[in-house]
Amino acid sequence: MSDTKFTPGPWVVSDTHPKRACLYISSPEDLWKTGDVATVYCAGAGTHEQDAHLIAAAPDMYSLLDRLFHECSDDLSGFAEMEIANVLKKARGES
């Protein structure tokens, strides 16, 4: 994952602000250095908390896909390998 430029995980949903219907996602180890990683505003009734937890899981999901891609590529079908490569590129902002 040396080619990534995002704040390393783990990320957690750290706080809520009910008047603005948003949650704050933070990297606990670097909270005082980096502040919040993201603020998730409600996109629809009752979805902001689920969105925030999905976003908070992103570094773990990226790490898992990256490991799968590099360590298991011999066991993946060509289609699966291409799909994983595309998702990793999207996460890095390359597509």
Image (cartoon, rainbow, N blue to C red):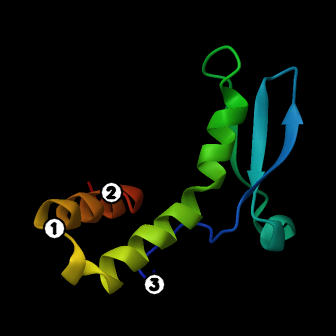
Whole-percent x and y of residue 30?
79, 72
Whole-percent x and y of residue 76?
22, 72
Which residue of the protein is positioned furthest toward the left in this rendering? 78
CA neighbours of label 3 inside 10 A, class few (<14), some (14 to 19), many (20+): few
Q: Which residue is mark 3?
A: 2
Q: Which residue is mark 2?
A: 87
Question: Which quadrant is home to the N terminus?
Answer: bottom left
Which residue is depicted at the point 39% across and 63% down? 92
Q: CA distance from mark 2 to mark 3?
A: 16 Å
Q: CA distance from mark 3 to mark 1?
A: 25 Å
Q: Which mark is residue 77?
A: 1
Q: Are marks 2 and 3 in contact (CB under 8 Å)?
A: no
Q: On the image, which quarter does residue 28 sit in?
A: bottom right
Tell which circle, 2 or 3, labels the residue nearer the N-terminal end: 3
Q: On the image, which quarter does residue 2 sit in?
A: bottom left
Which residue is depicted at the point 78% across and 24% down? 21
